[in-house]
Image (cartoon, grey):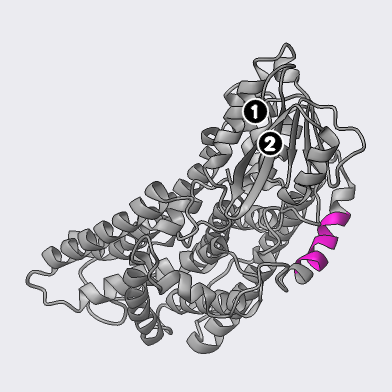
Amino acid sequence: MHTDEAVNGCLLGAMLEGETYRYDPQDRHGPVLYFASYPLVRAFGVTRLAELEPWLVRLVPAIFGTALLLALPLFAGTSPVGRGRRTPPPNTPAASDDAALPLFATALWLGFAAPFVYYGRYWIHETIFVLLTFLLIASVWRYLRSPHTGWAILAGVCAGLMPATKETVAITGLAGFAALVGTWWLARPTSAALPQRWPRDVLLALVLALFTAALLFSSFGRHPEGLIDAARAMLRFVGRARGEGHEKPWFTYLGWWLQPNLRSLPWFGWTLAPFAVVGAVAAWRQRRTAPMGIFWLLFTGAHLAIYSAIPYKTPWLALNFFAPCAVLGGIGFQAACAALPERGRRAITVGLLALVTLALARETQRLCFRFPAEPSNPLAYSPTVPDIEHLQARVEQFALTRPEGWQTVVQVVGDDYWPLPWYLRHFSSVGYWSTPPLELSAPVVISTPALAETVARRLGPGWSQQFFGLRPEVLVVVFLRQPPGTVP
């Protein structure tokens, strides 16, 4: 479990054990992940932290990642390819295939590409946030095409859930606003025939957005201070964007996207980039007749520009522009296939889809399943090393030889100990100190290497010592009290 997943697990465990969720604007993200996970784990009979398992909590991003694929049909008809020229009648198989092709190609990248598979089973906020972004865009676009109040309701709920998911809503909102303004300026779309009730629908959406966000930040009214903390979080977000240890050059995302690594060639980037360029050209050419294409182009570009400009960078943040870029790639895939000779077009199209799928599957197999926790994997950002499972097994084995069993006291000394709280979750008595306390009386003491000498001196003789890895180049020392007469 990654450190971020471990932190999320401890927060969810507190909720399961009866504590009210309290939003922390300092170092945490919004409450949606926890409130979405809570009913699922309760449905499996889990009532406390010790009963949580990685596969169970990781079902949550897997479900939302699957929902992202299922949401793609909401964008049917957004592709600019084929606009302005003769096309088959809408009910013919050829027309149906032509309309489905960009969505199917988009689904290949969203469903098979390594970044989406890797973080689609990573129990963090990103997959939920990307889904909500797509649903918000789809509901607004659908409302403009067919003004039903239901689409306004969906837009309002999604707009409220997004800030309650992650503070990066500020970046997505800025990118979306820039894309909307740019689309209006470049495409000059004709005004849609909105019904007379549209002001009421917009007001309804705004009220729902505010109500949804307030409901979640306040823990359904049980923690009203969360509303104030939500406002303070935006100021904290501005400071965090400066880096705080995650500073990287502006071209970092392009490197993660396109640069070969030690474990796999970047087939996701190498297959998506050329089709996205073709899609950008198609969107530009048909910007007046199909403005949604130019919106995807500007939305992708604005996201990439903003995330590249700010110093703070982590690989999962790239999903925010990888996902709309995949839509642009789907448009480009359709445009490339439409340019093929009619004779043999279908066979070549199927062949291209197969090649893209095989290339993506090869990269995904290596990065997501064979080498998921190695530092040479560009998706594995400060991963937890497998050695921590040996630490867990050793401490549990030791504890079960003692009469206290799972009540064995464990003392952890040092600042850099995550994700230990997750791996010690079966113990009921675990304490954490940033510096060695005067009394070290627990039979299990875990220390960071910097404090290990002080800890060993205070413990005295009769203890065994063993080093274990937490993360790359981050170790801890486990001290176990030996029975009298035992040679450590």
Can residue 299 be seen in this snapshot?
A: no
Left or right position of 402 against 262: right
Residue 52's place in the image compared with 244, above or below, is above
Give the magenta range.
228-237
Q: SS of the residue at dot 1?
A: helix
Q: SS of the residue at dot 2?
A: strand
Residue 112's place in the image compared with 262, above or below, is above
Q: Residue at x 88, y 46 (%)?
A: 224
Q: Amino acid at mark 2?
A: Val
Q: How many marks?
A: 2
Residue 37: image quadrant is top right
Nearer to us in this view, 44 or 440 = 440
Q: Where is residue 181 shown, x and y percent of the image?
A: 60, 82
Left or right position of 421 against 285: right
Q: Where is residue 227 shown, x and y percent of the image?
A: 85, 53
Q: Where is residue 290 shown, x and y percent of the image?
A: 41, 77
Pointer 1 or 2: first along the chain: 1
Please tell me how crowded label 2 is: few (under 14), some (14-19), or many (20+) other residues with Cα within 10 Å: many
State yes or no: discs 1 and 2 in contact (Cβ < 8 Å). yes
The circle drawn on residue 478 is 2
Task: Name the residue beneath numbered marker 1.
Answer: 395
Q: Residue at x 21, y 72 (%)?
A: 337
